[in-house]
Image (cartoon, rainbow, N blue to C red):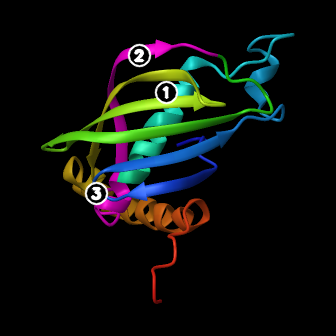
Amino acid sequence: MRFNLIDRITDLQPGKSIVAIKNLTLAEEYLADHFPGFPVMPGVLMVEALAQAGGWLIRHTEDFRHSTVLLKSARALKFVNFVTPGKMLQVSLEIQGWQGDECSFKASGTVDGQTAVAGRLVLERFNLRDRNPAAAAADEVQNRHWRELFPQLWTAPATAGA
């Protein structure tokens, strides 16, 4: 991914669901053009935030076995409210099913408790080496990157008695 649209993971239930946040600030360069005088997070970036959160859920659930997680499809998308600078987009995804290399999700994003975006996503996960054996080293680099970044986003809650 070129940039991270997830600032923190607030809840993570492996194999089930994830809740994460994206804080929108005026420092986001794309806001200068979208839209001048009325900066709002583009809908495509709201969907990307949902996809990135789903990617973290897949990676953590499968112990970072796949280097690549991509958005395969987005369906029944509804854009209801704007995300403006100073606001926090909270994204929530629940796994609806697994089929082969694809995982389907019910996804939504809210701002101040109000829906901003909702829909159904399908993410595909794979290793580059499965498509090109010469890419095995790239898989290792990517997986190391994901493993190093993950603790910056998620701190598992302490267990009782620990």
Mark 2 or 3: the one toward you: 2
Question: Residue at 19% across / 40% down in the picture?
Answer: 97
Question: Residue at 51% across / 78% down in the picture?
Answer: 158
Mark carried by residue 47: 1
Q: Nearer the viewer, residue 114 or 125?
A: 114
Amino acid beneath label 2: Leu
The residue where tag 2 is placed is 77
The residues colored magenta run: 58-81
The answer to the question of whether label 2 and label 1 lie on touching residues, with beta carbons closer than 8 A, is yes
Q: In 3D space, how far apart are the residues under numbered discs 2 and 1 (Cα atoms)?
A: 9 Å
User: Going by the picture, which residue comes out furthest to the bottom?
Assistant: 162
The residue where tag 3 is placed is 134
3 or 1: tag closer to the N-terminus: 1
User: What element does badge 1 sit on?
Assistant: helix
The picture places residue 41, in percent across and down from the top left corner, at: 67, 23
Amino acid beneath label 3: Ala
Q: Is residue 58 above or below residue 27?
A: below
The picture places residue 101, in percent across and down from the top left corner, at: 18, 44
The answer to the question of whether label 3 and label 1 lie on touching residues, with beta carbons closer than 8 A, is no
Q: Nearer the viewer, residue 15 or 68?
A: 15
Question: Residue at 41% across / 63% down in the picture?
Answer: 143
Mark 3 or 1: the one toward you: 1
Amino acid beneath label 1: Val
Q: Nearer the viewer, residue 101 or 132?
A: 101
Q: Residues within 10 Å of mark 3 (few under 14, many from 20)?
A: few
